[in-house]
Image (spheres, grey):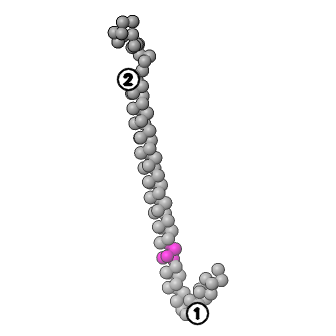
């Protein structure tokens, strides 16, 4: 912290404090903007992956539901109807 204070005092003594503050402001705002943009992209990607995961789960559940309905032995069909002489 003391180092920054010394740099500010040197800049003020040299008469370039305004330029130093402008450059510092640009650097800080650029850093903040990049963090905000990266966070926004991260949230967008996480939502996209979550929606894709939900769709995959729904497709799997629908497939299993259809498969169970197609091969359900409780639908009135029994093995004795195969003509095995029973």
Question: Looking at the picture, does residue 58 appear above or below residue 7?
Answer: above
Does the segment drawn in magenta span residue 28?
Answer: yes
Question: Looking at the picture, does residue 30 appear above or below residue 85?
Answer: below
Which circle marks residue 13 in the picture?
Answer: 1
Does the segment drawn in magenta span residue 52?
Answer: no
Mark 1: few/some/many CA within 10 Å (<14, 14-19, 20+):
few
Residue at (42, 25) in percent of width and height? 68
- Image coords of residue 18 (percent x, y): 52, 85
- Image coords of residue 2 (percent x, y): 65, 83
- Image coords of residue 24 (percent x, y): 52, 79
In the figure, is residue 18 to the left or right of 62?
right
Outermost residue on the left side: it is 83
Query: In the rendered structure, which segment of residues is drawn in magenta?
Result: 25-29
Which circle marks residue 84 in the picture?
Answer: none
Q: Which residue is mark 2?
A: 70
| In front: label 2 or label 1 | 2
Quadrant in the picture for the C terminus? top left
Q: Quadrant of residue 7?
A: bottom right
Per the image, label 1 sits on a secondary structure element best described as helix
Report the predominant secondary structure element of the magenta stretch. Answer: helix
Nearer-the-camera pick, 8 or 78: 78
Nearer-the-camera pick, 27 or 46: 46
- Image coords of residue 53 (percent x, y): 44, 44
Q: Are dots 2 and 1 in contact, CB under 8 Å?
A: no
């Amino acid at each position: 912290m003391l180092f920054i204070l010394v740099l500010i005092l040197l800049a003020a003594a040299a008469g370039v404090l305004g330029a130093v503050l402008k450059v510092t402001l640009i650097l800080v705002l650029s850093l903040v903007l990049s963090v905000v943009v990266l966070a926004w992209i991260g949230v967008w990607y996480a939502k996209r992956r979550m929606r894709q995961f939900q769709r995959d789960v729904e497709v799997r559940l629908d497939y299993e539901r259809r498969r169970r309905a197609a091969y359900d032995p409780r639908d009135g069909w029994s093995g004795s109807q195969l003509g095995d002489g029973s």
